[in-house]
Image (cartoon, coloured by chain):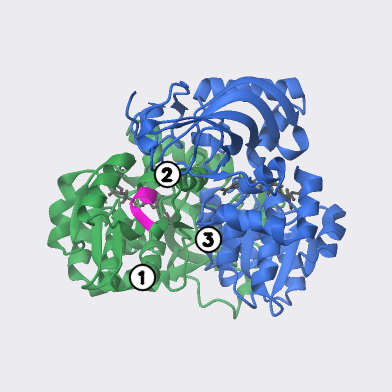
Chain colours: A green, B blue
Amino acid sequence: MKKGSKFGTHRVIEPKGILPQPAKVISNDMQIFDNEILIDVQTLNIDSASFTQIKEQAGGDEAKIKEIMLGIVKSFGKHKNPVTGSGGMLIGTVAEIGPALEGKTDLKVGDKIATLVSLSLTPLVIEEILEIRIDIDQVDIKGKAILFESGIYAKIPTDIPENLALSVLDVAGAPAQTAKLVKPGDTVLVIGGAGKSGMLCLYEAKKRAGVTGKVICLQHSDSARDRIMDAHLADHYITADATDAVDVLGKVEAVTNGEMCDIVINCVNVENTEMSSILATKDDGLVYFFSMATSFTKAALGAEGVGKDVQMIVGNGYTKGHAEITLQIMRESETLRKIYEDLYA
Amino acid sequence: MKKGSKFGTHRVIEPKGILPQPAKVISNDMQIFDNEILIDVQTLNIDSASFTQIKEQAGGDEAKIKEIMLGIVKSFGKHKNPVTGSGGMLIGTVAEIGPALEGKTDLKVGDKIATLVSLSLTPLVIEEILEIRIDIDQVDIKGKAILFESGIYAKIPTDIPENLALSVLDVAGAPAQTAKLVKPGDTVLVIGGAGKSGMLCLYEAKKRAGVTGKVICLQHSDSARDRIMDAHLADHYITADATDAVDVLGKVEAVTNGEMCDIVINCVNVENTEMSSILATKDDGLVYFFSMATSFTKAALGAEGVGKDVQMIVGNGYTKGHAEITLQIMRESETLRKIYEDLYA
Ligand SMILES: NC(=O)c1ccc[n+]([C@@H]2O[C@H](COP(=O)([O-])OP(=O)(O)OC[C@H]3O[C@@H](n4cnc5c(N)ncnc54)[C@H](OP(=O)(O)O)[C@@H]3O)[C@@H](O)[C@H]2O)c1
Ligand SMILES: NC(=O)c1ccc[n+]([C@@H]2O[C@H](COP(=O)([O-])OP(=O)(O)OC[C@H]3O[C@@H](n4cnc5c(N)ncnc54)[C@H](OP(=O)(O)O)[C@@H]3O)[C@@H](O)[C@H]2O)c1
């Protein structure tokens, strides 16, 4: 059996020498290396920015969506959307464990896991697409995938439905980072706050900002207002298009008496929302970009362009304990769990 | 005279409603609005990532470089490189001040200033390209530009040569952020440390990390070793290609006894260096991406992909006092000033 590198570089075909995530093409040969784990895949959870793009390209047509997805995996050996650069994650059953991992992993064959590394670096073969749950970005397949030695995963808990676990684990980085960033008394704005990652962020923000803080949900339609306010996820609900920075600026000014926000968390799935995020932040405040549609240069030069001294953080999909923190929310809040079961499972 | 918005949105042609930086096309009509400042431009300092791309596209040919630059400004009304998305800055003389700025600005007609907002949002007309200083990314032109009300600038000091001031002000955000981030005792790696922003970061890092800290310069050729070590800008000099993450990992491990770095500052001007930066950082450490060639998704998904809990910061070009901090380095360190006069002025 061939020896693999911890990070999976042995699978990189093009360009050589770089890691599997930035790589264009990787090998999806399902013969495992000595430190790899083979997974029988059950469901893919496609990243929201990626699935939105695919649905658009397909004009909403299911057969076309299948064709595009199969094409991506065939070309690149992984489900890395060439337009958005993003992936998603998967749920499946451990089928084989490389001998070099013995004693190093707590997994055994037959365990059901969710991978917490992006599909954009995961060797994947799709034999057949069985079902597309178009509204929740989930796709059931018959297929296999590989987890590298450095790859992180979560065992699927037994007290939470599988599809629900998959849905919330996909965005687990966001609420976990929110929990670390928000301090008592903070004014926090969540842009795209009624989405899947957004509501989890609102929940954590409310908890951390406490009674002296202020949590604001910004959403481009009014349709989620009752859901958000009835669940006490936010103190204020703003209806605005996040790509219209000047309008957002005015509305956030109104709600914060001109003081603006200590922390802005960007959870949208569309482009051109960097400036709204920056303008809504106080000088010396912080913007956390969880959205994969964020452009590095638009953020860096946008802030400079308006002379705004804000710290801007790239939403690392991983932070210690992120899976536990997120599953815990589903256990802790019956209200939120019901909402997520209705919407995302 | 027409009334303008603070952020210059009145100049945006396409797409409507967004700000001048993310906008594709803006108006470079040189008739000013009531809150704008007209500048007679003397020199453009093209962003390093942008100029590298233009030089490549032109195959190093000066006439082609001119053609590309004129084409960019003609198409977009500003010098925003369509490939890299980045700009640069300019030096020039105040020609006209909109009446709405009276009492609000300390500028007067005839003042020589450097704009500290990116060229990627600055309305610009190039009448003629007079001289290209190809090695230092500077281009003398005959032309005009507009500074918006929210635009920041620095008056050119009289004790520092103009070209030198322009060169260092272009990258002023980097050393100023370094000064804020680095604490005594930190191990700091500057990737691309022998470049223009890199050496300023090394200087500030050495000063802040102090005798108990460790500062490492990483550069892809050995040619700058003597310059860096003789000037005591770093404790260690690593020669490596920053796009080869696995090689960088090994070399940083060696120099730090496997402890890796508290802070990694990325100052290169090429793509695919996110993973080196992430792998060189300690768990719970911090990566500061100043490089405009940084990809948001590669950083976010790359860190997740190797299960690394690091904070990643988008290099905001602006932070309070950045111009003063950077010019001060040129006054404080005769050694560094000599190096910059030789290389960049
Ligand atoms: N950094 C990471 O590691 C990581 C991991 C996973 C996902 N992500 C990213 O996180 C983002 C959010 O994911 P998600 O699963 O939470 O997506 P989601 O459920 O689709 O949520 C997106 C939200 O943004 C709202 N929105 C869209 N356009 C808007 C606009 N112009 N103005 C205001 N609101 C707008 C949407 O409203 P409507 O529903 O009304 O359109 C929705 O509520 C995506 O970009 C995804 O790629 C990042
Ligand atoms: N965030 C902001 O607001 C802002 C503002 C201005 C500039 N920037 C960005 O900052 C970056 C640096 O600008 P600069 O003016 O300092 O550029 P620079 O002087 O050209 O420095 C780049 C350095 O990176 C080194 N380098 C290039 N490829 C490398 C590799 N593969 N491995 C190791 N080192 C490598 C270069 O070495 P060689 O010279 O040997 O090639 C050089 O020392 C650029 O990307 C620029 O766009 C950002």
Q: Residue at x 39, y 34 (%)?
A: B8
Q: Residue A193, position in %: x, y?
A: 27, 54
Give the CA separation, mark 3 to mark 2: 22 Å
> Does residue A67 lie above or below A154 as drawn?
above
Are labels 3 and 2 assigned to the same chain?
Answer: no
Q: Residue at x 33, y 51 (%)?
A: A280
Residue denoted by label 3: B312
Tag of residue B329: none
Give the CA separation, mark 1 to mark 3: 17 Å
Q: Earlier in the sequence, mark 1 or mark 2?
A: 2
Quadrant of residue A181 within the rendered picture:
bottom left
Instruction: Specify the segment rendered in magenta.
Output: A277-282
From the viewer's perspective, is B44 left or right of B8? Answer: right
Residue denoted by label 1: A179
Relative depth, front residue between A342 and A98: A342
Amino acid type, label 2: Ser
Q: Residue at x 63, y 60 (%)?
A: B265
Q: Are marks 1 and 3 in contact (CB under 8 Å)?
A: no
Q: Is mark 2 within 8 Å of ligand 1?
A: yes
Residue B68 seen anywhere in this rendered image of the structure = yes
Q: Nearer the viewer, mark 3 or mark 2?
A: 3
Residue A122 seen anywhere in this rendered image of the structure = no
